[in-house]
């Protein structure tokens, strides 16, 4: 059986998934006094949304709510 979803439906599902990740996550990174939500924390790094966070370079601080977890390079 073959399933086809239109590009609009796929885009809507992806947007809903990103919004859900943003709502659930308390994780954020701070760089140059700017704060960006973390969508996913992995063993080798973290994921931020490309539309809301510019290319982050250098040392950043990772927070879970108000609790400082670690510094990342």
Image (tube, helix red, strand yellow):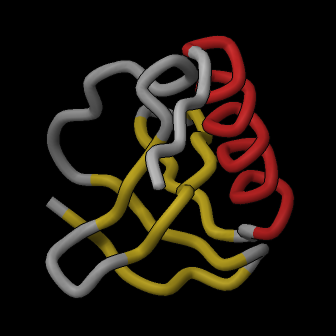
User: Which residue does the image show at 51% across and 48% down from the upper left?
Assistant: 30
Q: Position of residue 9 (x, y in %)?
A: 70, 24
Q: Quadrant of residue 33?
A: top right
Name above or below for residue 33 compared with residue 72. above
User: Which residue does the image show at 42% across and 26% down from the upper left?
Assistant: 50
How many numbered marks have been drawn onto this rendered protein structure?
Answer: 0
Q: Quadrant of residue 58?
A: top left
Left or right: 46 with respect to 34?
Answer: left
Q: Position of residue 42 (x, y in %)?
A: 31, 79
User: Which residue does the image show at 78% across and 40% down from the upper left?
Assistant: 16
Left or right: 41 with respect to 23?
Answer: left
Of 4 and 15, which appears nearest the observer? 4
Which residue is most to the right? Answer: 23
Which residue is most to the front? Answer: 1
User: Which residue does the image show at 56% across and 14% down from the upper left?
Assistant: 7
Q: Position of residue 62 (x, y in %)?
A: 47, 68
Name above or below for residue 30 compared with residue 43. above
Name above or below for residue 53 compared with residue 68. above
Q: Position of residue 2 (x, y in %)?
A: 45, 46
Q: Quick one: quadrant of the C terminus?
A: bottom left
């Amino acid at each position: 059986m073959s399933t086809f979803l239109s590009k609009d439906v796929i885009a809507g599902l992806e947007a809903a998934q990103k919004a859900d990740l943003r709502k659930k996550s308390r994780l954020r990174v701070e760089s140059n006094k700017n704060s960006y939500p973390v969508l996913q924390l992995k063993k080798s790094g973290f994921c931020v949304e490309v539309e809301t966070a510019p290319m982050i370079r250098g040392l950043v601080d990772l927070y879970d709510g108000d609790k400082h977890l670690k510094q990342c390079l």
